[in-house]
C-alpha cells in the first residue's frame, strides 16, 4: 500500500473512532469544514466496526463507481441487437440515448430530500439495489415498454448515486476530497471502458445472447450493494442536532439559486457533459467517414475513454491543491480545442493523437465533480449543490448530440458539427474559470 493510501486510511480511522461531537447538517451527517468547525464525519464508535468502516466506505465507493456506467455503455454496444430482438423502432432507440440525461436530471433532484430523511449511505444503497433490479430485469421484461421501464428504474438508481456520492466523500473524507474523488472517478472511467469493450464479447460467450450481455452487469451492481448495507446501518442517533441547540447562520435554509458560483458550475457541468456525449456518440462516425476502418474507429473511442482512467485519479488531486482551478479548466479545454481542430483538418492522418486529446479533455467531468465538493463547506451544501449542478447540467446536455446529428444530416459533412463543438468549448472554458474561483455557496446564498 502506498503512503498516500495509508494516510487516507489512518486519518479516516482516527475520525471513525472519535466521539460524536458537534452539530449536524440536514443530510443527517456531521458538518465539515469552516461552517462546522473542525472537519468531522459519521461515527461508528470504537472497536472493530469503527476501525474497519472507513475501509468499507472506500470499497463501497469503488464498487459503486464500477457499477454506475455499465448499464448505459453496455446498452450502447448492443443497441443494434436489442433493436432487432425487441422490434424496437428507430425513434425509440434514439430516445434511449437521451433518457439517461433526462433521468439524471429528474431523479437527481430527489436525492437531497431522501438523504435528509434516510441518510446518504442508505439512499446510495437503495440506488444500487435499483440498478441491480433494473439491469437484471430489462432483458427479460417482455417488449419495448418493459425494457424502457426497467431501464428507467436502473437510471433512477444511477441518478441518486451520482448526486450523493460526492456528499459521502465530503462527509467521510473532508481532508481527502481530491484523492477520494480521484479514486471514485478512476473507477467510474474503468467501469465505463470495461462495459463498452466487453459487452459484445460477453454476449458472444453466452451463445450470442444480447440478453445475457446486458443482464450480467447486474452482478457487479449487486456486489456493490453489500458494503453500503454496512454503511447504512452505521447511521447513529448522533446525527441529530442536540435539543435546544442555538440556531446559527449556517443552519439557515440554503437558497442554491442565489449563488452565482452554483450557476457557473451548473453551466460548466452542462457544457462538459455535452462535449462528452457528442464525443462518445459521434467520434467513431467522424473517423469512419474519413476512411478509418470501423474496427479501428471503435478502438479509437476505447482509447479516448481509457485515457480517463489514470487521469481521473490525477486531476482531482491537482485540483484539491489549487485555490483556483481555472488553470486546469483552461488546460483541459485547450486539449479539447486541439482535438477538435485535428478532427476537422486531418481526422484520419492524426486519428490516434486526436483520440488522446479528446480523452484528456473529457477529464473535465472529473474536475467538475471535485469542484462540487470544494465549493461548499458542509455535507448539506454539497448535497444541494450536487443535485442542482447535475440537474441543470444534464438537462443542458440533452440537445447536444441530437443537434450534431441534425447538422451532419443536413450539411452532408462534419464541418458544421465540429465548428459547433469548438464553439461550445469556448464558453465552457470561461464558465469553468468562473466556477473555479475560491468561493463557497454558503457565503453567496
Image (tube, rainbow, N blue to C red):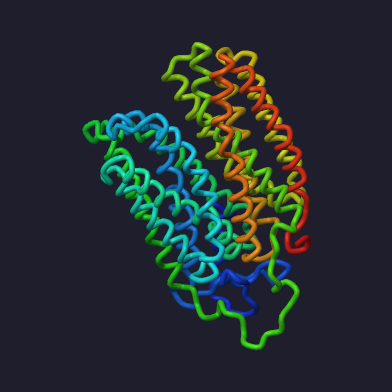
**Residue drawn at the location 52% of the way across and 81% of the way down:** 237
- Farthest residue, direction left: 207
Above or below for 17 versus 8 = below
**Residue drawn at the location 41% of the way across and 48% of the way down:** 152
The reply, left or right, for residue 384 in relation to residue 288 is: right
Residue 175: give x, y in percent of width and height. 65, 61
- Farthest residue, direction bottom: 244
Above or below for 410 versus 11 = above
Residue 438: give x, y in percent of width and height. 78, 54
Name the image quarter holding residue 126.
Answer: bottom left
**Residue drawn at the location 63% of the way across and 22% of the way down:** 418
Residue 162: give x, y in percent of width and height. 52, 52
- Give the camera-side residue of 190 and 371: 371
Name the image quarter holding residue 425.
Answer: top right
- Give the camera-side residue of 68 and 390: 390
Residue 444: give x, y in percent of width and height. 78, 60
- Give the camera-side residue of 36 and 123: 123
Above or below for 6 versus 252 = above
Amino acid at each position: 500500500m502506498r503512503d498516500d493510501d495509508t494516510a487516507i486510511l489512518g486519518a479516516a480511522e482516527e475520525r471513525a473512532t472519535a466521539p460524536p461531537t458537534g452539530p449536524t447538517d440536514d443530510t443527517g451527517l456531521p458538518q465539515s469544514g469552516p461552517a462546522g468547525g473542525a472537519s468531522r464525519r459519521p461515527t461508528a464508535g470504537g472497536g472493530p466496526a469503527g476501525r474497519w468502516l472507513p475501509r468499507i466506505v472506500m470499497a463501497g465507493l469503488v464498487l459503486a463507481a464500477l457499477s454506475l456506467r455499465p448499464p448505459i455503455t453496455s446498452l450502447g454496444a448492443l443497441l443494434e441487437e436489442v433493436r432487432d430482438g425487441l422490434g424496437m423502432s428507430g425513434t425509440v432507440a434514439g430516445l434511449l440515448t437521451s433518457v439517461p440525461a433526462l433521468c439524471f436530471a429528474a431523479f437527481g433532484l430527489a436525492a437531497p430530500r431522501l438523504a435528509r430523511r434516510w441518510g446518504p449511505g442508505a439512499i446510495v444503497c437503495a440506488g444500487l439495489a435499483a440498478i441491480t433490479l433494473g439491469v437484471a430485469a430489462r432483458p427479460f421484461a417482455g417488449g419495448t415498454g418493459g425494457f424502457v421501464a426497467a431501464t428507467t428504474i436502473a437510471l433512477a438508481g444511477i441518478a441518486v448515486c451520482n448526486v450523493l456520492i460526492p456528499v459521502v466523500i465530503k462527509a467521510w473524507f473532508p481532508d481527502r476530497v481530491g484523492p477520494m474523488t480521484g479514486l471514485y472517478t478512476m473507477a467510474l472511467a474503468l467501469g465505463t471502458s470495461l462495459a463498452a469493450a466487453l459487452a459484445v464479447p460477453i454476449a458472444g460467450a453466452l451463445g450470442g445472447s444480447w440478453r445475457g450481455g446486458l443482464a450480467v452487469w447486474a452482478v457487479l451492481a449487486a456486489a456493490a450493494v453489500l458494503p453500503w448495507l454496512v454503511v447504512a446501518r452505521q447511521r447513529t442517533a448522533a446525527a441529530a442536532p442536540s435539543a435546544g441547540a442555538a440556531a446559527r447562520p449556517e443552519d439557515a435554509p440554503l437558497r442554491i439559486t442565489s449563488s452565482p458560483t452554483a450557476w457557473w458550475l451548473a453551466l460548466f457541468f452542462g457544457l462538459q457533459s455535452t462535449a462528452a456525449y457528442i464525443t462518445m456518440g459521434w467520434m467513431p462516425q467522424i473517423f469512419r467517414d474519413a476512411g478509418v476502418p470501423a474496427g479501428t474507429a471503435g478502438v479509437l473511442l476505447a482509447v479516448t475513454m481509457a485515457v480517463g482512467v489514470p487521469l481521473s485519479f490525477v486531476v482531482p488531486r491537482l485540483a484539491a491543491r489549487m485555490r483556483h482551478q481555472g488553470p486546469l479548466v483552461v488546460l483541459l479545454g485547450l486539449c479539447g480545442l486541439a482535438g477538435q481542430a485535428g478532427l476537422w483538418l486531418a481526422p484520419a492522418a492524426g486519428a490516434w493523437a486526436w483520440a488522446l486529446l479528446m480523452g484528456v479533455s473529457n477529464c473535465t467531468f472529473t474536475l467538475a465533480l471535485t469542484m462540487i465538493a470544494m465549493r461548499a463547506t458542509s455535507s448539506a451544501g454539497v448535497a444541494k449543490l450536487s443535485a442542482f449542478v447535475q440537474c441543470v447540467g444534464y438537462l443542458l446536455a440533452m440537445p447536444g448530440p441530437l443537434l450534431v446529428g441534425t447538422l451532419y444530416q443536413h450539411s452532408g459533412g462534419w464541418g458544421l458539427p465540429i465548428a459547433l463543438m469548438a464553439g461550445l468549448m469556448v464558453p465552457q472554458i470561461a464558465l469553468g474559470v468562473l466556477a473555479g474561483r475560491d468561493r463557497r455557496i454558503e457565503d453567496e446564498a
